Amino acid sequence: MRGDTDETSGKEHSGSGRAARLGERSQGHPDPGSVSAAMLVEEICKAMKAA
């Protein structure tokens, strides 16, 4: 999925989805879904190493 580029700053931002209405305010904050998915993957890896 490709984000739109802001012509004034050159930064990409979400053009659709849940964060689209937040625009620049969402920059610099971790996505909660990505954070929780990463935590799950880490725990699964730990469990597999311990088994």
Image (spheres, rainbow, N blue to C red):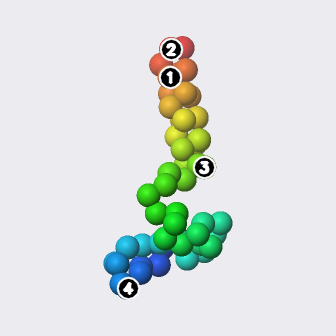
Mark 4 or 1: in front is 4
Q: Amino acid at mark 3?
A: Gly
Between the residue at mark 2 and the residue at mark 4, the CA separation in whole angstroms equals: 49 Å
Figure quadrant of the C terminus: top right
Label placed on residue 33 = 3
Asked whether disc 3 touches disc 1, contact meaning CB atoms under 8 Å apart, the reply is no
Could you classify mark 2 by the number of other residues whose Cα lies within 10 Å: few (under 14), some (14-19), or many (20 or more)? few
Sequence-earlier tag: 2 or 4: 4
Asked whether disc 2 touches disc 1, contact meaning CB atoms under 8 Å apart, the reply is yes
**Would you name the residue on which mark 2 appears?**
50
Mark 3 or 1: in front is 3
Q: Amino acid at mark 2?
A: Ala
Sequence-earlier tag: 4 or 1: 4
Q: Residue at x 50, y 31 (%)?
A: 42
Q: Residue at x 62, y 73 (%)?
A: 21
Mark 2 or 3: in front is 3
Q: Amino acid at mark 4?
A: Glu
Between the residue at mark 3 and the residue at mark 4, the CA separation in whole angstroms equals: 28 Å
Identity of the residue furthest to the right in this view: 18
Of helix, strand and loop, which one carries label 1?
A: helix
Of helix, strand and loop, which one carries label 4?
A: loop
Q: Is residue 27 above or below residue 44?
A: below
Q: Position of residue 13 (x, y in %)?
A: 47, 72
Can residue 2 be seen here? Answer: no
Q: Residue at x 50, y 22 (%)?
A: 46
Label placed on residue 46 = 1
Label placed on residue 7 = 4
Horizontal relation, residue 7 to residue 43: left or right: left
